[in-house]
Amino acid sequence: MVDITQLCVMAMAFWAIPFAFVREGHVKITFATEWMPARARSAIDAVAALAGAALVVLIGRYGYEQALTALAYGDSSQTIGIPMIWYWAVRWPASAAATLVVALRHAAVALSPASAR
Amino acid sequence: MLGIPPELVGVLGFVVTLVLVALRLPVAVAMGLVGVLGSIPLAGWPAVRFMLGTQPFGAVHPYGLSVLPMFIFMGVFAAHAGLSRNLYDGVQALIGHARGGLAMATIGACAGFGAICGSSLATAATMSRVALPEMRRRGYADSLSAASIAAGGTLGVLIPPSIILVIYALLTRESIGALFAAALVPGLLGTALYMLAVNVQVRLRPDLGPRGDRHSARERLVALARTWDVAVLFVAVIGGIYAGLFSPTEAAAVGAAGAFVFAALRGRVTRGVLLSGIRETAITSGMIFFILIGAALFNFFIESSNLPQYLVSLVDGVAWPAWAVMIVLLLFYSCSDASWTACR
């Protein structure tokens, strides 16, 4: 049970992260930039989205490396022996999805300064 | 790095993170990026590369984290089931007639909702939907209404179950049950003090919160009896943990299922509600898990900078009295509070 729960939580977590990006669910502080003109804020948001994309690209890229290692060693989970690669498999496509979403959002924000809040 | 002591790099990392957060970068992204970039000069690229592969996995893997989405789900569906409405009506019937009574009822209902919800944000959001229209209708000042909801919301994480205490327990290897027990008294104390603050405020400026209608003893009993489901959920979840019946994960599952059943029994679970409830759970969980990942990367950086050991040696070296260390810690935590506002 423990292993299956962990697998579910991991899948859920990594798939929910890009979803939270789509829905603007990630926490950010806005009061310090309230005074800026909308254009400046949207420029900052574009850079922020790019930074977010960079981070998820890094996590995805080197997570993939670790996944290959886990596969090569044939690691498996502690209680019922689910191959560890499953744990990586449920999250890796999500990392890729996250990258795409963040990058798209970055593009959208950068292209439409009028829609900036 | 260029002769700069690693501890200083650690401090710089903190500063840069705070600046990035102030510049609207999501908290998780700011911590993660600074963690990665800062670690490269300190630990070297091969170590950082390995860390990038392992830390995000390790941050999400612990079994204890499974309680988070379930406690979030529980709070979401408890609100959909109308439990927050019943709580508010119950407390309001008791003290609503007093001057500022609705604001105090809001705080009381927040405390009650905190007993079945582990998040301050969710508690404040739910209560603002229930209590704010009522206070507006009775001519309460917006300042007092909003303040009572915002202050009451903080009780959501203090009164168990509490998402932030679960995270703290996992990070520091403490017992979740023990932390929940420890937070109960401060939670109740906070409730009483917030109510007192409302009371003082309306004594000074009576126009902020006018008196309401007095309820008969019978009406009060009926309104209070309607909050039975909150009591059942709280006893099942928190009582189950203390009685040793459930592990925290099992208790969270019981709570999530229970809240869903209450909502279903009242016919509140439509397709739309189900979808929006799951969506809300997913967004909040994704946000928290991403912060855990960012924090794990940042933590690697801080460890590499040797800053924690340096600080410990500083504190050991100066032999300050305990209260002085306490004040410095409080100052430090109120500064770094920004990054934690996230989990409330």
Image (cartoon, coloured by chain):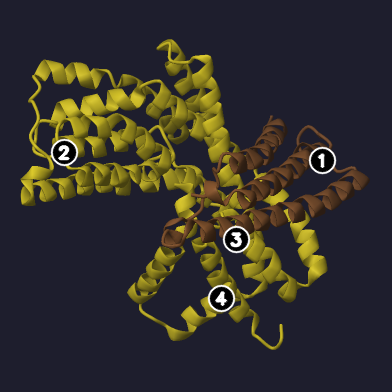
Chain colours: A brown, B yellow
Give the camera-side residue of A81 and A83. A83
Q: SS class of the residue under badge 4? A: helix
Marks 1 and 3 sit apart, C-alpha to C-alpha, by 27 Å
- Residue positioned 35% across, 20% down in the render: B229
Marks 4 and 2 sit apart, C-alpha to C-alpha, by 46 Å
- Where is residue B220, by image quadrant? top left
Give the camera-side residue of A29 and B302. A29
**What chain is tagged by disc 1?**
A
Q: SS class of the residue under badge 2? A: loop
Q: Residue A84's mark?
A: 1
Q: Give the answer, above or below, for where B10 lies relative to B193.
A: below
- Residue positioned 71% across, 82% down in the render: B1
Tag nearer the camera, 1 or 3? 3
Marks 4 and 3 sit apart, C-alpha to C-alpha, by 13 Å
Residue B133 visible in the picture: yes
Residue B247 visible in the picture: no
**Residue position for label 3:** B31
Q: Amino acid at mark 1?
A: Met
Q: SS class of the residue under badge 3? A: helix
Do the residues marked 1 and 3 share a common chain?
Answer: no
Q: Amino acid at mark 3?
A: Met
Do the residues marked 4 and 3 share a common chain?
Answer: yes
**What chain is tagged by disc 3?**
B
Marks 1 and 4 sit apart, C-alpha to C-alpha, by 37 Å
Q: Residue B11's mark?
A: 4
Looking at the picture, how far across and down is residue B179, in whole percent? 44, 47
Q: Are marks 3 and 2 in contact (CB under 8 Å)?
A: no
| A13 left or right of B45 in image | left
Give the camera-side residue of B234 and B103. B103
In primary-sequence order, the first of circles 3 and 2 is 3
